[in-house]
Image (cartoon, rainbow, N blue to C red):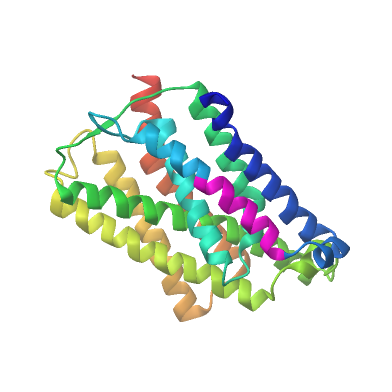
Amino acid sequence: MSYTQFTFLPVLCYLASTFIITLRLFRRESADRIPRSAGIGVGFAGLVIHGTLLYQQLFTHAGINLGFFHAGELVTWTILLLLLTSALSKPVENLGILLLPLAAVMIILNAHFHTAHILSAEAPWGLRFHVLISLLAYSLLAMASVQAILLAVQDHHLRHRHPGGFIRALPPLQTMEALLFEMIGMGFALLTLALLSGFMFLEDMFAQRLAHKTVLSLAAWIVFGALLWGRFKSGWRGQKALIWTLTGFVVLMLAYFGSKFVLELLLG
């Protein structure tokens, strides 16, 4: 089997896992026949193969390649790692219906388009810590965004007295809300740590090359902080929680991938 063919093995695993999870979610009789662990297990198989391939692509003699598509693939891999690990103890695997195909798409894009942005092997540990924490924060808040969408759909169906179909297969609304704000809380804590480490270990967070990224990251931090405060003080939920979560995530996505897209693909 060639390297290219081996690259598409995780794609097949992710799509198969998506199919199994979707089948269990939308067809009640399938949920009785197919164990919950089947979709999670196939997803983990893809994750292991994907991780092996990604390691070979990221770590070069010059350092870590965090080019646009490499970084995107690394983020989706991290998201799936968090998702599937959480699914072992919590009912969150249904988020994979959107996240698993997204990871498959990123593998295909990275196989066809190559960009390079090298984090030098001699980079200080503080900078590496900042990059790692930022990656984890982004991944958790991305999961929270998908969870918010699923929660909004569930809330809409229940309010309009249409609890049938796949809604019956979802956990109770209170459980879904608790999972959402657990993800946002953890993501907000990591984002706070990422910003603090950036100010500590980077020479100038407001330098011309970093200013837009810093400002947008701070704006996202304010949005998620306001959402958590609104939840704590006023019990925000439903549509309001969805709007604030997606707004914060879009701003955060622009902070990182927006700048990389402009610098590496448009100007590079």
- On the image, the x and y values in percent for residue 232 come to 45, 79
Q: Is 175 on the left-hand or right-hand side of 267?
A: right
Q: Which quadrant of the rendered structure holds the C terminus?
A: top left
Q: Residue furthest left?
A: 203
Q: Is residue 253 found inside the magenta-colored segment of the image?
A: no
Q: Looking at the image, how many numbered discs can be counted on the residues?
A: 0
Viewer-proximal residue among 150 and 95: 95
Residue at 41% from the left image edge and 73% from the top image edge: 229
- Residue 46 % position (x, y): 57, 45
Residue 165 on image: x %, y %: 84, 63
- Specify whether residue 42 is painted magenta: yes
119 vs 177, left or right, is left
**Which residue is at the front of the view, 88 or 109?**
88
Q: Is residue 43 visible?
A: yes
Give the position of the N terminus as an image quadrant. top right
Magenta segment's dominant SS is helix
Q: Is residue 178 above or below residue 119?
A: below
Residue in the picture at 31% in, 51% down: 132
Residue 22 higher or lower than 176, as above or below: above
- Name the one closer to the observer, 138 or 108: 108
Q: Is residue 260 left or right of residue 206?
A: right
Of all residues, the one furthest to the right in this rendering is 29
> In the depicted view, which residue is nearer to us: 237 or 59?
59
**Residue 144 in view of the camera:** no
Q: Quadrant of residue 121?
A: top left
7 relative to 237, above or below: above
Residue 156 rendering spot, x and y as whole percentages: 74, 65
State the image quarter where residue 211 is shown: top left
Specify the segment rendered in magenta: 36-48
Q: Residue furthest front?
A: 1
